[in-house]
Amino acid sequence: MAEELLRLEHVCKFYNQGTPSEVEVLHDINLALNKGEFLALIGPSGSGKSTMLNIIGLLDRPTSGALIIKGQDTSDLNDTAVTGLRAHTIGFVFQDHHLISAFTALENVEMPMLVERGFRGADITAHAQELMKKVGLEAVQNNMAANMSGGQQQRVAIARALAMNPSLVLADEPTGNLDTKSADSVFELMREVNHELGTSFLIVTHNLDLARRCDRVIEVVDGRLVR
Amino acid sequence: MKSWLPFTWIAATRFLREGRMQTMFIISGIAIGVGVIVFMSALLTGLQANWIKRVLTSQPQIQLIPPDQIARPLRLGESVVELSTVQRPSQRVVSIDQWQKIRDRMLAMPEVTGVSPTMAGSALAVRGAASRSISISGVDPATYFKIVRVPDYIVAGVARLTNQDIIVGTQLAVDLGAVVGDKLNLRAATGVSVVLTITGIIDLGSKGANERVAYVALRTAQSLMGVVGGVTTIDITIRDIYAAETLAQQIQASNYVQADSWIATNAQFFTAVQAQNTSNTMIRVFVALSVAFGIAAVLVVSVIQRSRDIGILRAMGSSRRQVLLVFLIQGGLLGFVGALVGAGVGTVGIIYLHATLHEADGSELFPIILERSMYISTILLATLTGVLAAAAPALRAASLDPVEAIRG
Ligand SMILES: Nc1ncnc2c1ncn2[C@@H]1O[C@H](COP(=O)(O)OP(=O)(O)O)[C@@H](O)[C@H]1O
Ligand SMILES: [Mg+2]
């Protein structure tokens, strides 16, 4: 029996609650995610996929319901505790790469560790270099992030997401802006990491071909889980 | 990236470096403001110090003279003034009562560094057909030259004053057609007259003074004025020149003399200094304000431009405090670097001005005084201004919601 990593219990999310423009974006979501699982999240645009990812990623809080990570209810954690838990449990890969352009690729990978410790260190650099090697970019690791191709940037983003050895990587349309070939290799990289390190992945995608290659596919329509 | 550098510092410098144009423009703006401050401060300090030096080497800091002898109106009865016209006593030379005793008392005061009794009066200087009315100062060269640096003002001859010698101003020498070694006939109102030899000619820097000034030995003056053994003034120098007024009041309170301090005598100068310092402070305040608004404006834009970066940093675990620091450091750095550049530019400016401007005779116009404390305080002030100006944008950055920031 697989070990549970996190669970959403009766999660609802309202935007602009109590105003005339109130919208219910997520409606009674119940979902469990196991350790080492590779999950695809599909659904039409505007159905609430990113909102769900933000809630799971502790970037946003549900209006009602609970997010339980490794058995711990996160509802009562304060801002600092949430920031700490997020840094150590979850890595993010976004659609638009979201590297910080003022830094080199390697420095972007170092960033989560740098932020946590406050200072640089040889161990941090060594770990970042190792990750750059894993994503196949050690040759260009000192290039400025802004000067890399979309596929390369997304590989750097994956390396960065792995920097703190997270249990889960949340990827919001990570291949959405890539050509088919790059998309395929980025997806394969994630699958590889999943197999090698046992990191769980939750990937939002519109690419049904890629979704089919995941362990499990869940679908959101109008804020409800339909499978 | 140096390993000991904190993350906040690294991020701040990278952001500044990436926004090169904005950074260069705001630093130039700050540098201009700070340059003006440094230039103005150095100029004012130099001018003021120069003026004070001139004052203090050409006049005593406290001068004791006989108490003012004003005749009182004659009164016949209660508040009835019979003779309303009051005249000062005639121009006879009045000696300070028991001046030796006062001199000794002055010498005993720890604040006093020099005391010199002087006999002043006027006389007519005659040479051939030319004659001029002059001011005679009878001095004891040994003590007096320490208070007023007469030897420093000598342009011809030497600063020697025996009983037969006289030192005269340049203009007086010209008016009388005399040179060093010539003889002058001096005649006083008392009817006494003496013949003296010009040993030196001095330039006190003002035509009025150079027309009338004449130094003779104390004894010579005493016999000319008919007050043998008397003196009209006692000149005093003191340790702390700014304590002159307080000290003068003390002396006046405990001695039968009138004590005038250089501060009271030069009240106008002090008003001018005050006005200069006030306007210098005003300039500092306004420059600081415009620097602050400039930095704030640049950082407000930067926070908007970088909201996605800030969102990523937050998503990767940076605290609000770290984000706040990143922007406060940027503000402080802008202020600091701008001030450094400005201090350099201001210094070059003042040195250039100093090298180009000269007195008519080619000597230096004023000394430039570049005080380290002025630089340190200006740079600290600019850095602090930068940090304070960054407060509002930094708080804004720190309060960004990562979800909103990432969505863009
Ligand atoms: N901050 C917000 N305020 C109001 N409505 C929002 C906000 N964020 C998202 N929404 C709305 O919630 C719905 C779901 O958005 P999202 O989770 O981004 O969908 P998806 O990622 O599936 O395209 C959309 O209709 C969107 O307009
Ligand atoms: Mg989305």
Image (tube, rainbow, N blue to C red):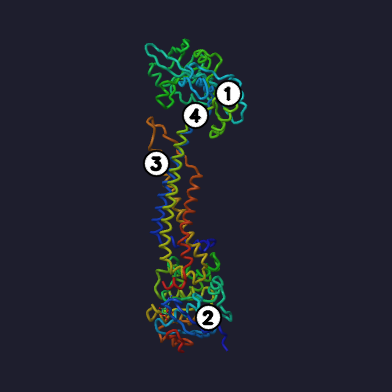
> Counting residues from the N terminus, which is met first, the one under dot 3 or under dot 1?
1
> Counting residues from the N terminus, which is met first, the one under dot 1 or under dot 4?
4
Residue neighbourhood size for the residue with mark 1, other residues' Cα within 10 Å, grouped as few (<14), some (14–19), many (≥20): some
Residue marked by disc 4 = B57
Quarter of the figure that contains the C terminus of chain B: bottom left
Q: Tag 3, which chain?
A: B
Residue B293: quadrant of the picture: bottom left
Q: Is residue A173 visible?
A: no
Mark 4: which amino acid?
A: Thr
- Co-location on one chain, circles 3 and 4: yes
The reply to whether dot 3 and dot 1 touch (C-beta < 8 Å) is: no
Q: Tag 1, which chain?
A: B
Residue marked by disc 1 = B256
Q: Position of residue B140 (x, y in %)?
A: 54, 20
* Helix, strand or loop at mark 3: helix
> Counting residues from the N terminus, which is met first, the one under dot 3 or under dot 4?
4
Closer to viewer: mark 1 or mark 4: 1
Marks counted in the figure total 4
Figure check: A46 above or below B228 = below
* Image disc number at residue B352: 3
* Helix, strand or loop at mark 1: loop
Q: Position of residue A58 (x, y in %)?
A: 51, 76
* Image disc number at residue A199: 2
Label 2 within 8 A of ligand 2 by Cβ: no
State the separation of the CA atoms marked 3 and 1. Answer: 53 Å
